[in-house]
Image: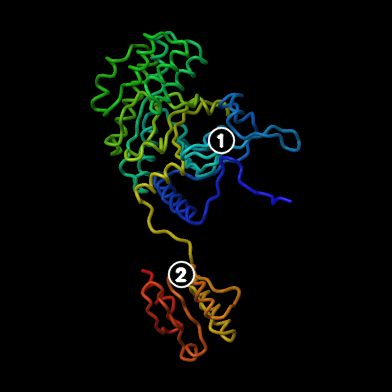
Amino acid sequence: MSETQFTLPRGMKDIEPEEMTKRIWLADKIRQVLWSYGFQLLEPSPVENLETLEAKSGPGVREEIYWFKDKAGRNLGLRFDLTVGMTRMIANRFDLPEPIKIGCIGGVWRYDEPQYARYRYHTQWDAEIYGVTEPTADAEIISLGSDILDKVGLKDHEVRVSNRKLAEGFLQTIGVRSQEELERLLRIIDGMGKKGPEQIEGELGRAGLSQDKVKRVMGFADIGGDADKVLPDLEKKLPKNDLISKGLQELTGTIDNVDSLGKRSKVQVDLRIVRGISYYDGTVFEAYDQAGEDVGAVFGGGRFDKLCRIYGKRDMPATGVAGGYERLMISLEKKGLFPDLEQNPQVYVAMAGEDVRDETIKVMRALRNSGLRADRDLKERPLKKQMDYAASAKVRIIVIVGPRELKEGNVRLRDMKTGEERNVPKNRVVEEMAKILA
């Protein structure tokens, strides 16, 4: 009889203690920036009615997400991003003062093909601003994302900015009329940074564009660079219609406001950025680690003014940003930007005999109450085995509680890093630990 093999579903992964420590550190850094910008943190439900998810992305989203029938026969789905749930939460909250600034750190599920830096369950950080039509909100969101990267040490990054109205307006000028055709071509443009020119030309041709129109689309998407150099000539390079004029106005306003927030040096104009998700309808952007671009965008987002109307009774302009933990962690690992982190106990309290058990526990509790990570041997084994375990657990300091030392009001400290061993007064053990660990 063969043994049962219990394995993870495809595209899933366990998070070991070493990685979890880094994730906790990362969450703390992100949270600090969100709070510093005045965002309130919340978390939408991980399970939504399927119609809620389809309202944003259409019935075709069933092929890309986890959905199921519950025991009552209701169609439900696991959230595939945080924006849908956050928007649903506030769409009918007329009591909230605007602007509404909310953020979240949570997990999402997508039934994608697993690949480098992408799993079917991954963690995102997300921030949204509702109720502001002005480009000040887009600039605030871009600055927030850039400051998060700065906070974790990823200072060598750039944010590539465009406006979806520019791409949509341009496609209108070459005769694209149907929404279906428009969305298909926008997805192709969105993938241009990841594919070669020949592959893109082939995709545009198969989408029904003539050779002349293919060249025009390629030329449009090739526009980019430093904002100071690109923006002055952009109006001359693009054809004219109302949508393009509006897009130029929004893009210029966003970059001007980014400048006032001290982030202009981080921003590049890139007309290939359209974001593949159909609900974006204004300024859009993606950020890349310049030294690790193979990882892909470390955050992205943009304006989605029409989404609130889907879930609520009023139009509410909105803009937001989201970033994936996994890609960000790969970039941080490559650059060695994680500090020395560990979850192992800092102090191990060993008892030399059952007679000192109560005193051992008192010492351990005092250490824990002071904020130190302290542990003892729950098996209450002989001292030699306790010491061996503490060494294997890579504990920094061992506190030995023995009858002879206690009679003198002391405990014995062993610094596992230096090998030094000495007696200290029992009532000063916390103070001595702080000195060593400082």
Asked whether residue 331 appears in the rendered view, the answer is yes
Circle 2 Cα neighbour tier, 10 Å, few/some/many (<14 / 14–19 / ≥20): many
Residue 53 in the image: x percent, y percent?
60, 30
Q: Is residue 298 left or right of residue 230?
A: right
104 to 409, vertically: above or below: above
- Closer to the camera in the image, 97 or 217: 217
Residue 60 in the image: x percent, y percent?
59, 24
First along the sequence among labels 1 and 2: 1
- Closer to the camera in the image, 113 or 136: 113
Q: Is residue 201 left or right of residue 278?
A: left
- Closer to the camera in the image, 177 or 156: 156
Residue 189 in the image: x percent, y percent?
41, 22
Asked whether residue 101 appears in the rendered view, the answer is no
Q: Residue at coordinates 29% horizontally, 30% vertically from top-left?
A: 256
274 to 209, vertically: above or below: below
105 to 24, vertically: above or below: above
Residue bearing mark 2: 395
Amino acid type, callout 2 = Val
Residue bearing mark 1: 110
Amino acid type, callout 1 = Arg
199 to 86, vertically: above or below: above
- Closer to the camera in the image, 103 or 287: 287
Report the colour scheme: rainbow
Q: Residue at coordinates 50% horizontally, 24% vertically from top-left?
A: 278
Q: Residue at coordinates 54% horizontally, 78% vertically from top-left?
A: 362
